[in-house]
């Protein structure tokens, strides 16, 4: 593809998305008289459109120069109506750099790499691609999908779409979910590749099993087994077997409620992983809420080791930005592991919401201090499905990485 076409492609997809969205027929429109059911299902489906603009800046003491990015994301999707239980969904995604492409590294490889060195990475490379393309079948409480899809499992600690990044994470493979009675659900997925937020595709042959059971409306137990087997030698260090189980609950006492989230797990090396991994996982989060105010405290442990040849617990398919601070210093767990203790407070005021969190980071093995972090977010939901937001992370290093301040202003809209 020529450089001129590569630069024009995001604009063309953006224009096409706006035109198609404006011209799309309502999902509830009835088929015309005499129109075949299959034709009606294919042509009278539902169009979805999501736009997100974001300005981000990074002041990282590891670099002399700061990083800045101004990016726009378009996600245009179309889902057919169901026909004999079958439906199809396709989503195009385009991320475009608006004028600050030389002010940050974009974390990509190959032709997507913007070539900037000496500035912090803001991992939102320019890309236009088919983000999802899948065939779905549903019958009763059974649901089967195959193709390219996003996958969100529970709180996304082990598997998620990384929706914070402009280019989201997706998978090539197949999955099946089965409802059992009114309270239980089990699922299995085979993953043949992960399409990462930086635009690269990592082939694998991985297996994911999960189950949940609602003991009552306020208490759910769940379990996950994740076997990762990466195909390329350079990715073999991420191959692992992870098993975890936990519960989420919310207890009510008068005008107060008390959310609780507990999960225990273990991870071992698997397949061709050259590193020995035998690491525990623990998360405990408890809180108190009244009205629209919530106070939470939590603790998470990702096991590690100080022994040569031994590795730490990794979650490479997770929505990592949600965990261990928004400064993203722990997207890869250090060899000595990580212990993250945090406290957060949130308050909703009308259409606005404020969130403040503080983290203390330490090594799991040896207990060395890594640093601390403050995170702050303010969002405002407008009546026409648009959101305005400001967000910041201030990481104070203490023996790990360097002092870093990140800030974002963004707005999103969609239907």
Image (tube, helix red, strand yellow):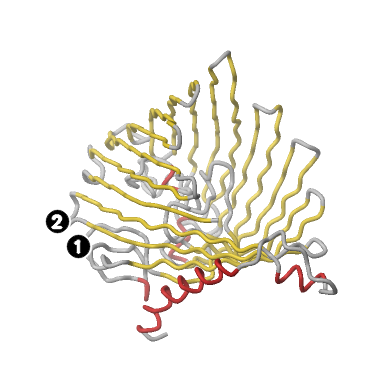
**x, y percent for residue 352:** 42, 37
Image quadrant where residue 68 sits: bottom left
Answer left or right for 224 relative to 314. Answer: right
Q: Which residue is mark 2?
A: 64
Viewer-side residue, 239 vs 112: 112
Residue at image coords 72%, 45%: 186
Viewer-side residue, 334 vs 42: 42
Residue at image coords 59%, 52%: 227
Residue situated furthest right in the rendering: 34
Q: Earlier in the sequence, mark 2 or mark 1?
A: 2
User: In terms of secondary structure, where does tag 1 sit?
Assistant: loop
Viewer-side residue, 115 vs 236: 115
Pointer 2 local density, CA inside 10 Å: few below 14, some 14–19, many at least 20: few
Q: Is residue 145 above or below residue 130?
A: above
Q: Which residue is mark 1?
A: 118
Answer left or right for 314 relative to 152. Answer: left
Pointer 1 local density, CA inside 10 Å: few below 14, some 14–19, many at least 20: some
Of the 4 image quadrants, the one containing the C terminus is bottom right
């Amino acid at each position: 593809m020529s450089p001129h076409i590569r630069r024009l492609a995001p604009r063309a997809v953006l224009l096409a998305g706006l035109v198609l969205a404006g011209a799309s027929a309502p999902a509830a429109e009835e088929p015309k008289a005499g129109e075949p059911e299959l034709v009606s299902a294919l042509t009278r489906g539902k169009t979805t459109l999501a736009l997100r603009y974001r300005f981000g800046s990074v002041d990282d003491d590891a670099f002399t120069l700061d990083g800045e990015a101004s990016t726009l994301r378009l996600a245009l999707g179309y889902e057919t109506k169901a026909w004999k239980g079958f439906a199809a969904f396709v989503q195009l995604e385009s991320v475009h750099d608006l004028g600050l492409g030389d002010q940050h590294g974009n974390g990509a490889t190959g032709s997507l790499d913007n070539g900037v060195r000496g500035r912090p990475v803001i991992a939102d490379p320019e890309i236009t691609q088919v983000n999802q393309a899948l065939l779905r079948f549903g019958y009763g409480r059974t649901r089967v999908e195959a193709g390219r899809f996003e996958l969100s499992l529970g709180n996304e600690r082990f598997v998620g779409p990384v929706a914070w990044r402009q280019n989201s994470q997706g998978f090539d493979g197949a999955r099946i979910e089965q409802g059992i009675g009114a309270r239980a659900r089990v699922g299995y997925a085979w993953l043949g590749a992960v399409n990462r937020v930086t635009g690269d595709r990592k082939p694998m042959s991985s297996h994911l099993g999960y189950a949940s059971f609602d003991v009552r409306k306020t208490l759910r137990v769940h379990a996950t087994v994740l076997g990762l087997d990466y195909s390329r030698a350079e990715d073999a260090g991420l191959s692992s077997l992870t098993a975890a189980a936990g519960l989420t609950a919310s207890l009510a006492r008068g005008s107060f409620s008390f959310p609780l989230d507990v999960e225990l797990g273990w991870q071992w090396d698997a397949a061709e992983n050259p590193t020995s991994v035998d690491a525990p996982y623990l998360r405990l989060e408890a809180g108190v809420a009244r009205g629209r105010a919530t106070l939470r405290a939590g603790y998470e442990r990702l096991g590690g080791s100080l022994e040569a040849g031994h590795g730490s617990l990794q979650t490479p398919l997770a929505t990592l930005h949600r965990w261990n601070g928004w400064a993203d210093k722990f997207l890869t767990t250090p060899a000595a592991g990580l212990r993250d203790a945090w406290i957060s407070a949130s308050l909703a005021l009308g259409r606005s919401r404020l969130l403040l969190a503080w983290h203390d980071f330490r090594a799991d093995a040896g207990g060395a201090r890594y640093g601390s972090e403050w995170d702050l977010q303010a969002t405002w939901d407008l009546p026409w499905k648009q959101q305005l937001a400001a967000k910041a992370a201030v990481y104070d290093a203490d023996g790990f990485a360097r002092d870093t301040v990140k800030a974002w202003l963004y707005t999103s809209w969609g239907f």
